[in-house]
Amino acid sequence: MKSLTTKQQLSQYLQAERSTGATIGFVPTMGALHRGHITLIERARQECDIVVCSIFVNPTQFNDPKDLEKYPRPIEADIEKLEQAGCDVLFNPPVNEMYAGNEQWHLEIGELEHLLEGAFRPGHYQGVTQVVFKLFDIVKPDKAFFGQKDYQQFMVVNRMVELLKLPVKLVMCPIERESDGLAMSSRNVHLTPADRGHALVLSRTLQQVKNEFGAADIFTLKEQAVTAINREPGVELDYFEIVDGVTLHVADQNSKSVVALVAAKVGNTRLIDNMILR
């Protein structure tokens, strides 16, 4: 696996590959890789000739400096995982390689930016679009692979691709879960054993909603879910919503796709999860 740290190195390398007709698959990450990330690498390998993974903890998408500071960065372990997964190129730039001084960025992505996660993390999606645009501009991938766990983030990046007419196909890959149902996340390392037990209420509740979807109305399902999560000690619910998978507004009979999304603080760690119901 090639490990590159500058835009110029990466551009030159990929330009040479592209000139031979090779297709480029890209998996952008913030590192602290787990099985979920590795499935994205594997999917990219199936669909593209060259697989590029970026590891960059992007400062502009953190609202809380403390959260940025404590974000896990086990780079040696990450490199080992990528090599085992057959990744071709790691792009691991320093912050000053990605950002030059006081850059301004604002992309008008509409209400997507302010719903659900956007309401709890103001400015977060501007930071996401800013860095993903930069990465797409450097890598120029044919396909980019994202996890379903960040469902709203996928929609935001998709909106950016439409608005800026970027020539990349986005692929959403299913959530990877631990054997007990917990959605894999880089943040899980911060959970104490007790927290980890309490965190299971999120996936358990989503599964229950999925099982009962269609038999009960959406309002009732949401009420029951909120009650179940609020009963769990050590868990502070931010939201549980059953929404239209395209608009993120509350779902109704006409919604062709329906997704249940949840965000909660478990101990000191904020977790998100979701399940596609229809």
Image (tube, rainbow, N blue to C red):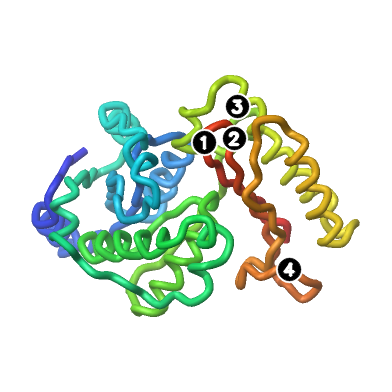
User: Residue beneath label 1, please?
Assistant: 269
Q: In this view, does 153 lie to the left or right of 56?
A: right
SS at circle 4: loop
Q: In the image, what residue type sits under mark 4?
A: Ala
Would you say the residues marked 3 and 2 are in contact, meaning their CB atoms lie under 8 Å apart? yes
Q: Which of marks 2 and 4 is nearer the N terminus?
A: 4
Q: Which quarter of the rendered picture does the N terminus lie within?
A: top left
Would you say the residues marked 4 and 3 are in contact, meaning their CB atoms lie under 8 Å apart? no
User: Residue beneath label 2, please?
Assistant: 266
Q: In this view, does 192 lie above or below 78?
A: above
SS at circle 1: strand
Q: Position of residue 172 (x, y in %)?
A: 50, 57
Q: Which of 47 and 144 is in front in this view?
A: 144
Would you say the residues marked 3 and 1 are in contact, meaning their CB atoms lie under 8 Å apart? yes
Q: How crowded is mark 1: few (under 14 residues within 10 Å), some or many (20 or more)?
A: some
Q: What's the distance in space between the residues labelled 1 and 2, CA to CA?
A: 5 Å
User: Residue beneath label 3, please?
Assistant: 195
Q: Position of residue 54 (x, y in %)?
A: 28, 48
User: Residue beneath label 4, please?
Assistant: 251
Q: Which of the 4 image quadrants contains residue 122?
A: bottom left
Q: In the image, what residue type sits under mark 3?
A: Asp
